[in-house]
Amino acid sequence: MQNTFSKSEKLCSKRGFAILIDAKQSFYAGRIRVSFYFDLPPELIDSPCQVAIVATKRDFKRAVDRNLIKRRMREAYRLHKAPLIAQLLEQGKNLALLFKYNSREIRSFKEIEQDMRQALRQLAKKF
């Protein structure tokens, strides 16, 4: 499996977001809040796992800072997603994820990566 983060892996549909938010299944991994929903309808999902990454304007007024946080989170997800994707493919399930950065300070890539690894491990245990 390639370590890429393609368009088909990004959660873009409004209906997908609505289902994900209504599900109200979430947990915290360090300073990342993870909301998830298993088994979206097949017409809404193109890959086994679709992801949205959020850094709020309320916490980071400057777009440059929000983009930096989101870039670091995307990279951490891209590097550590393989076991989760393999498990989803093996079980024939799909998953919608929302990662929300839950801190008011800009943290280093290493710290964000550590939280992302913890989040992906907890997700793998959930199913």
Image (cartoon, helix red, strand yellow):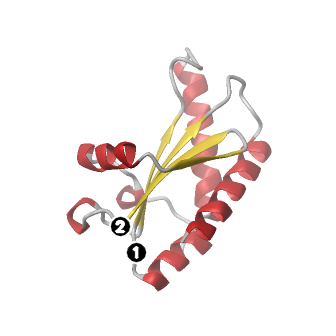
Taking the view exactly as shown, the residue that stands out farthest to the top is 61
Quarter of the figure with the C terminus: bottom right
- How far from the left and from the top, in percent, is residue 126? 57, 66
Q: Which residue is mark 2?
A: 39
Above or below 83: residue 65 = above
- Which label belongs to residue 121? none
Residue drawn at x 35%, y 44% as measured from the top left: 22
Using the image, determine if residue 84 lies above or below residue 113.
below
Element assignment for label 2? loop
Residue at the left extreme, as displayed = 43
Mark 1 Cα within 10 Å, few/some/many (few <14, many 20+)? Answer: some
Tag 2 near tag 1, CB within 8 Å: yes
- In the displayed structure, 70 sits above or below 65; it is below
Q: Nearer the viewer, residue 84 or 19?
A: 19
* Residue 116 place in picture, x, y as percent: 67, 52
- The reply, left or right, for residue 120 in relation to residue 8 is right
Choose between 100 and 113: the one closer to the eye.
Answer: 100
Instruction: Kindly indicate the quadrant of the structure image that contains residue 31.
Output: top right
Q: Work out which quarter of the rendered image holds the N terminus and state it.
A: bottom right
Tell me the residue that label 1 is attached to.
93
Amino acid carrying label 2: it is Asp
Number of numbered discs: 2
